[in-house]
């Protein structure tokens, strides 16, 4: 019964609004003015909130998009290579070294988690990397960005709490030698 009543009310309101379009518009305008601040904040947060709520669906959507638009991806890659040749070389050196078992993916040097990215402090030493999980990798780059507007190759610094971890020898002993040998 309760739902019937609600539906009836909704229908009644809908009809009333349809009968007085000007009144409805004025009301909407007033509502927007009164709640401008809140609505603006809502608009600002809508994107990140939406993405956080729909993370899995979005991931699938992007995966399909990549499959359906290989030429667009190739274009992005080309652009990146011409814009940042040193970075691109360093990335391909890493993936080749991993494929050939010369480099082993390590757990995050801060929290010990997988999966990890290879973070370069200096792109001219392509196999000299710090292994960082997505979150800690992003935090390093955020810190680097705030410290300098220039490329991060010039600033090898990491957040202070990370220093002790970064300067420890890598957990698997062999990697350093094989890395620097090439
Ligand atoms: Zn981490
Ligand atoms: Zn990095």
Image: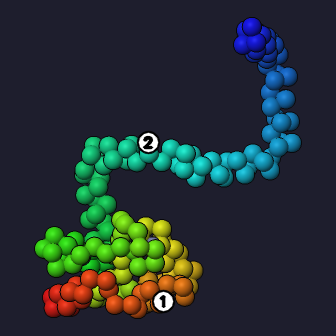
* Residue occupying image coordinates x 75% and y 45%: 39
* Position in image of residue 164 (x %, y %): 47, 90
The earlier-in-sequence mark between 2 and 1 is: 2
- On the image, which quarter does residue 25 sit in? top right
Residue that label 2 marks: 57
Q: Dot 1: within a 10 Å radius of its alpha carbon, few (fewer than 14), some, or many (20 or more) residues?
A: few
Q: Position of residue 13 (x, y in %)?
A: 79, 15
Q: Quadrant of the N terminus?
A: top right
Residues under labels 2 and 1: Cα distance? Answer: 37 Å
Residue 137 horizontal/vertical position (percent): 44, 73
Q: Quadrant of the C terminus?
A: bottom left
| Residue 119 appears in the rendering | no
Residue at the (76%, 12%) spot, across then down? 2
What secondary structure is found at the residue carrying circle 1? helix
Label at residue 114: none
Query: Is residue 117 visible in the rendered structure shown here?
Result: yes
Above-or-below relation of 74 to 157:
above
Question: Which residue is at a point 29% across and 52% down the rendered structure image?
Answer: 72
Observer-nearest residue: 108 or 9?
A: 108
What secondary structure is marked by label 2?
A: helix
Q: Is residue 78 above or below residue 84?
A: above
Q: Tell which of 60 and 105 is nearer to you.
A: 105
Mark whose residue sits in front, 2 or 1: 1
Rendered view: 60 above or below 101: above
Q: Is mark 1 within 8 Å of ligand 1?
A: no
Ligand 1 closer than 8 Å to the CB at disc 2?
no
Return the residue nearer the eye: 53 or 105: 105
Image-quadrant location for residue 64: top left
Disc on res. 163:
1
Residue 20 lies, in percent from the top left, at 82, 16
- Look at 31% across and 75% down and name the residue there: 106
Q: How is the image coloured?
A: rainbow
């Amino acid at each position: 019964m309760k739902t019937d009543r609600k539906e009836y009310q909704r229908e009644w309101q809908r009809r009333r609004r349809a009968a007085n379009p000007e009144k409805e518009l004025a009301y909407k305008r007033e509502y927007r003015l009164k709640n401008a601040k809140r609505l603006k904040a809502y608009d600002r947060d809508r994107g990140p909130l939406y993405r956080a709520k729909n993370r899995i669906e979005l991931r699938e959507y992007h995966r399909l998009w990549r499959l359906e638009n290989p030429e667009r991806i190739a274009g992005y890659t080309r652009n990146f290579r011409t814009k940042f040749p040193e970075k691109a070389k360093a990335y391909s050196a890493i993936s080749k070294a991993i494929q050939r078992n010369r480099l082993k993916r390590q757990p995050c040097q801060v929290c010990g988690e997988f999966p990890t990215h290879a973070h370069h402090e200096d792109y001219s030493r392509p196999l000299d990397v710090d292994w960082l999980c997505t979150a800690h990798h992003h935090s390093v780059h955020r810190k680097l960005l705030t410290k300098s507007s220039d490329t991060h190759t010039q600033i090898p610094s990491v957040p202070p709490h990370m220093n002790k971890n970064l300067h420890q020898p890598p957990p698997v002993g062999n990697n350093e030698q094989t890395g620097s040998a090439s």
